[in-house]
Image (cartoon, helix red, strand yellow):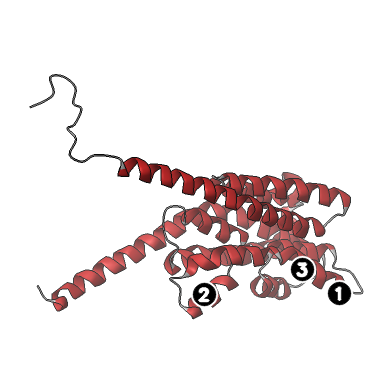
Amino acid sequence: MTAESNGPAAIHVTHRAARCEWCDGLKAVAPVAAVVMPVGLLFGALSSAKGLTLLEAGLMSILVFAGGAQIAAMDLWLDPMPVAAIALSTFLINARHILMGLSLAPKTHGFSPRQRFFAFFFLTDEAWALSERRVLNHPLTPTFWFSLAVVIPVVWSAGTYIGARFGNCLGDPCAIGADFTFTALLISLIAGFTTTRTALSAVLASCVTATLSYVALGAPWHIVIGATVGLTVAYVTAPRDRVAEAAERNLISDALSNLDPAAPLDCPSGSRP
């Protein structure tokens, strides 16, 4: 059989695999999108209360695209505008994206430079968490990434528009706990791939430190301090996990090398042919 005859079949398999990756991404992001919507409503309502127009609120969600930073900016939105305070707050809150980018960068080796550029533009907490969970069992492909990464900004922008347009009719979203949905979502996503001692130690250290920093210093310093401590703990504990895994592999290798392939099988009595 020639290579040409294999061409259509290979293309069909490739297209089918791409469809599977696309469907996997949509399935993974569906519950996340349901939670992003009320947070978008919350921001839209806050922006409307601060006097932003529909266009201004929409452009902020499309161009800035950082939920936590946008909501924090609304808390600082005064007259006269504290530009320096808003810029510093936005930088500190979004500094966690540096760590998320460092975490995902080695797993995007199958991306082209252009795909990698746009992939990290759409980097969010949810997309990062879903991707980290994905790479536990599958490689991270551009199809999977963009199938979930593009859905989140669309839902976020739609929630912003609805919240800004009908914010007065919706009432206070915080009264029904809508402001906690984002936190609850991240807790559930991180729990899905925190399966090693290193990850668990880093998460616990980060949570405890961030909580204490929030009580002592307030926002947004708790984000930077918590992330730094979590990264440090992960760096310190990771070598120990690697040593333990290497020792386990060596034990298995030694056990296999000691097996004698010529030795007869120890079959139960009556089971020999």
Q: Is residue 150 visible?
A: no
List x then y, in percent, for residue 196. Answer: 55, 45
- For image coordinates 50% across by 62% down, the residue present is 148
Residue at (88% x, 72% y) in the render: 82
User: Residue 15: which disc?
Assistant: none
Query: Which residue is under mark 1?
Result: 84
Horizontal side of residue 155 vs 6, given as left or right:
right
Q: Position of residue 217 (x, y in %)?
A: 87, 54
Q: Which residue is mark 3?
A: 90
Which of the 4 image quadrants contains residue 56?
bottom right
Residue 250: x and y in percent read 42, 46
The mark closer to the camera, 1 or 2, is 2
What secondary structure is marked by label 3? helix
Residue at position x 79%, y 55% from top? 222
Marks 3 & 2, CB-CB < 8 Å contact: no
Q: Earlier in the sequence, mark 3 or mark 2?
A: 3
Residue 60 position, x and y percent, is: 70, 72
> Is 178 on the left or on the right of 137, as rendered?
right
Amino acid found under the numbered disc labelled 3: Thr
| Precedes in sequence: disc 1 or disc 2 | 1
Q: Residue at x 88, y 74 (%)?
A: 81
Residue 8 appears left or right of 94: left
Q: CA distance from mark 1 to mark 2?
A: 31 Å
Q: Quadrant of the N terminus?
A: bottom left
Q: Is residue 265 above or below residue 50?
A: above
Amino acid of disc 1: Ala
Residue 30, relative to residue 50: is it above or below?
above
* Residue for badge 2: 116
Q: Is residue 219 visible?
A: yes
Give the secondary structure at mark 1. helix
Using residue 112 as the reference point, say whether residue 100 is left or right of it. Answer: right
